[in-house]
Image: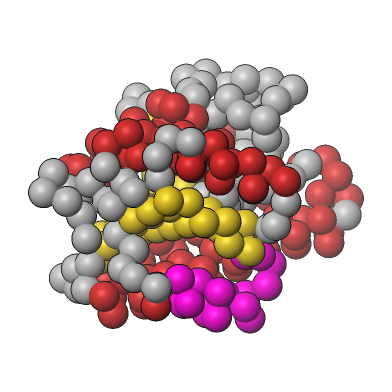
Amino acid sequence: MKDAFGAPQSLLILGGTSEIALATARRLIARRTRTVYLAGRPSEALDAAAARLRALGADVHAVGFDALDPASHEEVLGKLFTEGDIDMVLLAFGVLGDQARDEQEPLSAVHVAQVNYTGAVSASLVCAGALQSQGHGSLVVLSSVAGERARRANFIYGSSKAGLDAFAQGLGDALHGAGVHVMIVRPGFVRTKMTAGREEAPLATTPEAVAVAIETGLRRRSETVWVPGALRVVMSALRHVPRPLFRRLPV
């Protein structure tokens, strides 16, 4: 259960090596979170991430989880909820892909869609059902401003995030009144290893800034969080730009 200050005492991260997710975990552990499950493909990176969080004083468990194996999600994730209530689930896995390659190699594009959308739908539904059964908890879904409007430069990734975003909105509506809080986080360009070497977009941010926004959003019970906040206004304007003009914009 959350403590008297509303901080989650237990956290499940789907995508256990995500820099944004780990920044969020560090921040929550500094507040009052004591149990953390890092779910991801078994690797040295996952084990190292767990060790770093343990050093901060949390009880951390590395859990084998594969977004591309939806058939295993109910067993793997459902088992965690049988070990005790989980106050917060952070869905943070995803791949950026390579737009030029993915356009030429349809199976590569399908891989992006399967990880970012299909895998996320499966994992979200399993966790949402478990949260509903326990009667409380938050599901935080890392979306992206890329899903607000498809751009020529990354429409494959953007379309997968658009699907995830729409799904999460609907899931939040379906769970309204059931004691489960669904929060969608829409960061802009985040400086991480995944984006290293790519041209930086305006209003770029950091994993730490996204973590602060997530914590604030949880405290306020927000349904949608933009990082940075100015992107809400920017994307509202871009959504209404006529397509012939939008194609010519350097975005």
Residue 86 drawn in magenta: no
Q: In which quadrant of the rendered image does the N terminus lie?
A: bottom left
- Relative to 193, say whether 59 is above or below: below
Q: How is the image coloured?
A: secondary structure
- Relative to 44, say whether 191 is above or below: above
Q: Nearer the viewer, residue 234 or 224?
A: 224
Q: Position of residue 53 (x, y in %)?
A: 49, 40
Q: Nearer the viewer, residue 250 or 36?
A: 36
- Residue 71, can we see it? yes
Residue 238 appears in which quarter of the rendering? top left
Give left or right: position of 96 versus 190. right
Residue 27 appears in which quarter of the rendering? top left
Q: Position of residue 122 (x, y in %)?
A: 53, 72
Give left or right: position of 10 versus 177. right
Residue in the image at 20% along x and 42% along y: 219
Residue in the image at 81% along x and 49% along y: 102
Q: Which residues are magenta?
A: 65-80
Q: Position of residue 88 (x, y in %)?
A: 34, 56
Give left or right: position of 64 versus 88. right
Q: Main secondary structure of the magenta part?
A: helix
Q: Nearer the viewer, residue 36 or 144?
A: 36
- Relative to 141, say whether 79 is above or below: below
Residue in the image at 64% along x and 48% along y: 46
- Residue 96, can we see it? no
Please count the marks in the image. Answer: 0
Q: Position of residue 181 (x, y in %)?
A: 26, 60
